[in-house]
Amino acid sequence: MRSTDLKAAARIRDAALERFATHGVAGSSLRAIAADADVSPALIVHHFGSKDGLREAVDDFVVEFVATVLDGFAEHGVGDDSVALFTRFAEQPAMIEYVSRSIVEGGSAGESLFDRLLELTLTGLDDMQANGLMRSDIDDRPMLAIYLLAADLGVMLLREHVKRHLGVDPMSPEGLQRWARTGMDVLGSELFTAPPTEEAP
């Protein structure tokens, strides 16, 4: 695909993400997305085939973004860098809204997105164990992955209630910093281990 085509496809995907986040997939027409992206509906069909194909592209973008964050945990472990990793989600407010809406709406597409996020979480735990950044005696890894994913999705779904009680949007940079620090306090001392240090020669 040429550079201009890639840029147009990315612009369409980003416009779809914004509109899906605000209006839901069912409430978003290709015509409206085309207007947001300043392209023709025919160009959307050319790149993505249909609205379902466009949603799949949006899901791919979400999964790829989450994967980069989890890769950071697998490389650096849980510590001060974790706060910076979590706050990267503040750079993608539409993504947060889209994930929340998709999970709540359910259906096969919502189930697929949840399943992909869960698989990423499981892979991330495996990588952390392999790198010596997590306890190796965890018996119920599937439940642990669901617990961690449910905690993060839960704060997205309960965003407005959390905001009422804390006085800060939990998905803002400040809120994500507090969420990350609290999560590390709760889990860090028992579940995760410090990054291995190099032995002195």
Image (tube, grey):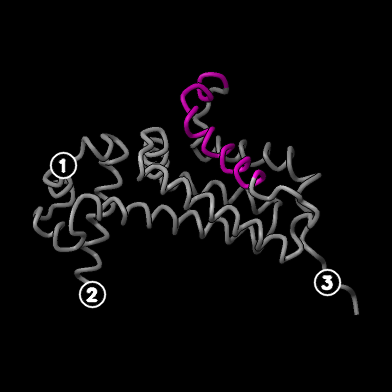
Give 104 or 162, whichever is nearer the viewer.
Answer: 104
Q: Earlier in the sequence, mark 1 or mark 2?
A: 2
> What span is colored magenta in the figure?
143-165
Residue neighbourhood size for the residue with mark 3, other residues' Cα within 10 Å, grouped as few (<14), some (14–19), many (≥20): few
Q: Position of residue 162 (x, y in %)?
A: 53, 24
Q: Position of residue 119 (x, y in %)?
A: 53, 54
> What amino acid type is highlighted by mark number 3?
Glu
Residue 37 lies in the magenta stretch: no
Give 119 or 93, whichever is nearer the viewer.
Answer: 119
Horizontal placement of 186 versus 63: left or right? right
Give 100 or 173, whichever is nearer the viewer.
Answer: 100
Mark 2 vs mark 3: give the one in front.
2
Secondary structure under the numbered disc 2 in the rendered image: loop
Q: Quadrant of the C terminus?
A: bottom right
Mark 3 vs mark 1: give the one in front.
1
Which residue position is annotated with label 3?
198
Q: Earlier in the sequence, mark 3 or mark 1?
A: 1
Horizontal placement of 129 versus 29: left or right? right
Residue 145 lies in the magenta stretch: yes
Q: Which mark is residue 1?
A: 2
> What amino acid type is highlighted by mark number 2?
Met
